[in-house]
Image (spheres, rainbow, N blue to C red):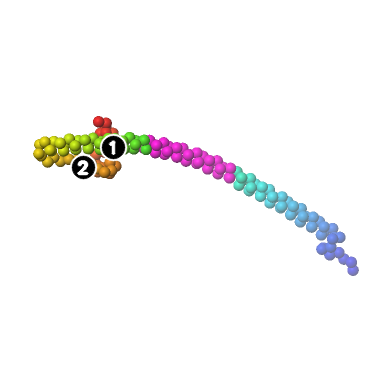
Amino acid sequence: MGSLSPESDNDPRYASVTDERKRKRMISNRESARRSRMRKQKQLGDLINEVTVLKNDIGKINEQVDVATRRFMEMESKNDVMRAQALELTDRLRSLNSVIEMVEEISGQDLDKPEIPQNPWQIPCPLQQPILASMFDC
């Protein structure tokens, strides 16, 4: 007998089931593609936001670097002034020690002479008394 099986291409029920499956698969694929596009769009938006945040961070860091650079330059300038003042004071101390030596020769007394440091930056200073700029303005 020539009864049609459901798998037969000639069976209208099979054709409608196949068409329904194709339609559902197509709808599912479209939905999947839509979700994929939405994910990619969200990822792109997230990356754009991250770039914006990172650019802002870079701007802030650059400002901090500029401030630190200015402070460094100011300190370097102040250090240069202090080095010059320390050299001048060392020269004055040498001159005063020469005067003390002359006084010792004339008077015959042994006077205490301050030691002249080899490196003015290693002058021992009491921590309780900070060095004031006015101390160097002689």
Q: Residue at x 86, y 64 (%)?
A: 4
Q: Residue at x 84, y 60 (%)?
A: 9
Query: Element under label 1?
Result: helix
* Camera-side residue of 86 and 109: 109
Q: Which amino acid, by three-letter code, is at mark 2? A: Glu
- Stretch in magenta: 46-75
Q: From this viewpoint, which residue is outermost toward the top?
A: 138
Q: CA distance from mark 2 to mark 1?
A: 14 Å
Residues packed near mark 1 inside 10 Å, few (<14), some (14 to 19) or many (20 plus): some
* Camera-side residue of 12 and 49: 49
* Camera-side residue of 88 and 77: 88
Residue under pointer 1: 87
Q: Quadrant of the C terminus?
A: top left
Residue under pointer 2: 115
Question: Residue 71, can we see it?
Answer: no
* 86 part of magenta stretch: no
Q: Which amino acid, by three-letter code, is at mark 1? A: Leu
* 54 part of magenta stretch: yes
Q: Position of residue 125 (x, y in %)?
A: 24, 42
The answer to whether residue 110 is left or right of residue 7 is left
Between disc 2 and disc 1, whose residue precedes? Answer: 1
State whether residue 8 is above or below residue 125. Answer: below
Q: Position of residue 71 (x, y in %)?
A: 39, 37
Q: Quadrant of the N terminus?
A: bottom right
